[in-house]
């Protein structure tokens, strides 16, 4: 074997080794047929945490006398959901799921605080002569909310050696808009345990 061929083989071996150690990407996937199955892929807030927390809190709220004994479905507004964790968590996902599940299970009606600016702009458009008088809408006809729901997501992370625990607490409050009294408040606790392991290439 000549030196040229030997050098070429060594170079190819080095290139193959370098390529195997290069950056990796997720290039092939599949659909999970059960989005409600447990996700403990890492130690961050997950959709499983959100599903469990919202499910239990919706059940608690739905069974509260202010909702259960109401003669007609209360009108509710979901406002702030504070994120007091060290993670970047889109709390809008939590409030969206909360609203949908409360509508499904308790038949609550909701007013959309986020849509108020859009509604106001549409009033201006309709009342500028752009639509027929028969279909025109304007201020003064909206339904006022009976209750406001807000909440907070907290977390505590603890580590000792190879062990780690992540604790979450999602707290919700429902306030009577007329009296300012909190008529329902509850929380859901979640704690996840992890053990550090070496991950090979």
Image: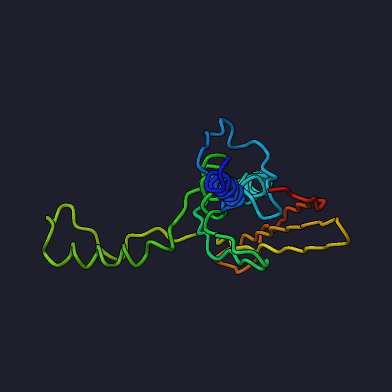
Q: With 184 as the anchor, is 113 left or right in this view?
A: left
Extreme residue toward the right, this view:
161
Q: Position of residue 174 (x, y in %)?
A: 62, 59
Instruction: Farthest residue to the front: give it.
Output: 2
**Image vertical order of residue 192 relative to residue 145, above or below:** above
Q: Residue at x 25, y 62 (%)?
A: 122
Res 36 → quadrant? top right
Q: Residue at x 69, y 59 (%)?
A: 171
Q: What colour scheme was applied to this rendering of the protein? A: rainbow
Name the spot of residue 200 as percent of width and height, x first: 72, 48
Q: Position of residue 86 (x, y in %)?
A: 67, 67
Please count the marks in the image.
0
* Residue 34 point in image, percent of width and height: 59, 32
Residue with the most extreme top position: 33
In the drawing, does residue 130 fall left or right of residue 110?
left
Can residue 84 be seen in this snapshot? yes
Q: Residue at x 88, y 62 (%)?
A: 160
Of residues 46 and 160, the one drawn nearer to the viewer in this rendering = 160
Frontmost residue, 1 versus 16: 1
Image quarter in which the N terminus is found: top right
In front of the other: 48 or 171: 48
Q: Nearer the viewer, residue 51 or 137?
A: 51
- Taking 41 as reference, is 132 left or right? left
* Image position of 36 (left or right of 193): left
Q: Is residue 24 visible?
A: no
């Amino acid at each position: 074997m000549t030196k040229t061929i030997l050098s070429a083989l060594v170079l190819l071996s080095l290139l193959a080794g370098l390529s195997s150690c290069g950056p990796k990407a997720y290039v092939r996937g599949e659909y999970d047929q059960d989005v409600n199955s447990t996700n403990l892929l890492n130690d961050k807030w997950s959709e499983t945490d959100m599903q469990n927390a919202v499910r239990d809190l919706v059940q608690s709220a739905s069974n509260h006398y202010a909702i259960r004994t109401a003669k007609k479905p209360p009108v509710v507004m979901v406002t702030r959901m504070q994120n007091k964790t060290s993670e970047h968590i889109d709390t809008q996902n939590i409030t969206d799921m909360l609203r949908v599940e409360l509508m499904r299970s308790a038949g609550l009606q909701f007013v959309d605080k986020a849509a108020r600016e859009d509604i106001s702009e549409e009033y201006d458009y309709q009342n500028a002569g752009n639509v027929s008088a028969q279909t025109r809408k304007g201020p003064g006809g909206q339904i006022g909310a009976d209750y406001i729901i807000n909440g907070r997501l907290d977390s505590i992370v603890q580590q000792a050696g190879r062990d780690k625990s992540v604790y979450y607490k999602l707290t919700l409050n429902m306030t009577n808009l007329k009296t300012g009294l909190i008529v329902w408040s509850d929380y859901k606790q979640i704690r996840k345990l992890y053990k550090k392991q070496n991950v090979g290439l």
